[in-house]
Image: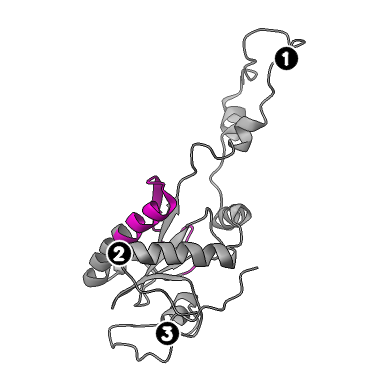
Amino acid sequence: MTSFVIKAHENRVLPAAWNTAPDCPFCRIVRGESQSYALYEDDMILAILDIMPLRFGHTLVIPKTHVSRVSELPDEFAAQCGIAVSKVARAISGALQNTALNVVCNQEYAQAVPHVHYHIIPAPRPDDAPAPALASMPVPGPDTQAGPPQLPDVVADPREARDRVAQPLTEKEMHRREYELRNTLEEDDARRLMASVRALLGVAPQKL
C-alpha cells in the first residue's frame, strides 16, 4: 500500500478566490490537510498522481476552487485548467515515453468526487498484454474443424432482440467496474515518476 509520507502543502493561507469545501478530499489536499504526489501547482491549479490509477501515470488536474460541475467553473479557472492539462500531459508523455493518452472530465455521471477534475490517463503501450477478450479466444489447432465462424441464432421476436441489446450501466455499476480495474500506486514508483515529471516541468523536487 502507498504510505502517505509526502507533505505537499504546509500552513498555507488560502486566497479569497479559493472556495473550498470542508469534506471534499481534493479541497483537503489544496488546504494542506491531506498529502499527495504533487506534479504541478500554480495559483489556481494543482496536479497530482492518482493513488488508485487506471494505468501508471494516471494524473488528476484539479482547480483549487470548489466547483462540482465543469459547466459552472469560472472562466479564469477553466482557462488555467486547459493550460495545466496541456503542460502536465506533455511532461507525462515525456516521462513515460508514450505520447498516447486520454484526457477526461466527468460531470455528475461517472464523477466519483464532486469537485471538477481532469483525468490524464496514459494509453496502453503496443507491447502491453492483449485485452482479455482477445487473449481468451480459442486458437485453432490440428483437431479443430475448419469452417466459417458460428453466427448467433436468428431472433424471430423483435422484443427478444430488444432484450438482448446491452443496457447502459447504472452509475453504481460503472463505479464498481472502474474500481475493479484500478491498482494501488506504489510509493517508490510514484516518487520516481513524480521526480521525472517535475524535472520536465522545471518544478523543484518535492520535499519528502
Give the spatial CA distance, label 2 vs label 1: 52 Å
For label 2, the residue is: 84
Give the x, y percent position of residue 60: 43, 64
- Other residues around mark 1 within 10 Å, as few (<14) / some (14–19) / many (≥20): few
Callout 2: helix, strand or loop?
helix
The span picked out in magenta is 87-113
Q: Are discs 2 and 3 less than 8 Å apart at CB?
A: no
Amino acid type, residue under disc 1 in the picture: Gly
Give the spatial CA distance, label 2 vs label 3: 19 Å
For label 1, the residue is: 141
- Other residues around mark 3 within 10 Å, as few (<14) / some (14–19) / many (≥20): many
What colour scheme has been applied to the protein in the rendered image? one colour
Tell which circle, 2 or 3, labels the residue nearer the N-terminal end: 3
Tell which circle, 2 or 1, labels the residue nearer the N-terminal end: 2
> Relative to residue 23, is residue 104 depicted above or below?
above
Amino acid type, residue under disc 2 in the picture: Ala
Callout 3: helix, strand or loop?
loop
For label 3, the residue is: 31
Check residue 103 for magenta coloring.
yes
Q: Are discs 2 and 1 less than 8 Å apart at CB?
A: no
